[in-house]
Image (cartoon, grey):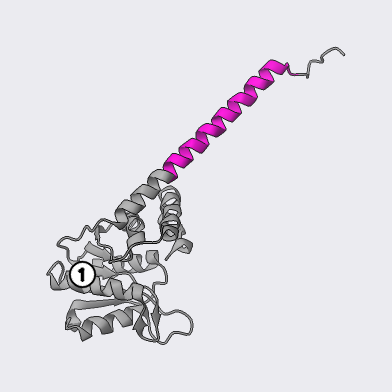
Amino acid sequence: MAATDQDEPAAPKARRGRRLLWCAAGLLAALVLYVGGTFVQVWQASRSDGARKADAIVVLGAAQYNGTASPALQNRLDHALELYQDGLAPIIVVTGGRQEGDRFTEATVGYNFFRDNGVPDEDIRKEVQGHTTYESVAATARFLRTEGIDDVILVSGPATAKRLSGISGDLGLDAAISPSDGTPTFGSLIRETAAVSAGRLIGYRRLDRFDT
């Protein structure tokens, strides 16, 4: 049967198919390199303590049980207290709101811990509205700026260190990241890799669902 004007020769069609496959393979390789490199950065950040002199220490909230800190929150509080006692900053900010059914906010549990350990009331600030890491850091940045403060140490779990660095940069904070003690699980590193990979592309404000 004679070819019509609409028929496409087989060779050009095959070449176009190969080009599409090469493009797809190139995009896949770039994605793997991007995500793989981000995983390495998340892992490295989890093992790096950037603590230095600053104007305030900000403790990111974690679960509490009827006024008692969870192990994750207690690790953060203990670490922040050490930083304060070492004279790295004169102010501690405790963050974290109340989950449905809770009698205490995460920030209140932190406040009680520091008061019980001799930190004067005038050296403690509370942020009780945030339910995600981004919300807590953003709210803290706003009220600290009313005191002329934007140089802070952020204390959270090890796995979130890289994301915290990105969030603080988005919010204009001059932040050092000082993770609490502990070894992050592989699952938490994977979740944070996904969050950081996406956050760099579309902004961390949209990634509250990745919060840990």
Residue pushed farthest left?
87
Residue 16 spot, x, y in % from top left: 63, 23
Q: Is residue 85 above or below residue 177?
A: below
Q: Which residue is mark 1?
A: 147
Residue 163 spot, x, y in % from top left: 36, 57
The structure residue drawn at horizontal position 19% and vertical position 83%, both measured from the top left corner, is: 117
The structure residue drawn at horizontal position 38% and vertical position 85%, both measured from the top left corner, is: 104
Q: In the rendered image, is residue 162 in sight?
A: yes
Instruction: Locate the N terminus and report the quarter of the image it occupies.
Output: top right
Q: Secondary structure at mark 1?
A: loop
Specify whether 70 is left or right of 32. Answer: left
- Identified by mark 1, the residue type is Glu
Q: Is residue 167 above or below residue 127?
A: above
Specify whether 152 is left or right of 167. Answer: left
Residue 181 spot, x, y in % from top left: 28, 66
- Asked whether 141 or 81 is in front, the reply is 81
Residue pushed farthest top?
2
Specify whether 56 is left or right of 64. Answer: left
Magenta range is 8-35
The structure residue drawn at horizontal position 12% and vertical position 69%, both measured from the top left corner, is: 87
What type of secondary structure mainly makes up the magenta span?
helix
Instruction: Locate the C terminus and report the quarter of the image it occupies.
Output: bottom left
In the image, residue 191 lies in the stretch drawn in magenta: no
Quarter of the image where one finds residue 86: bottom left
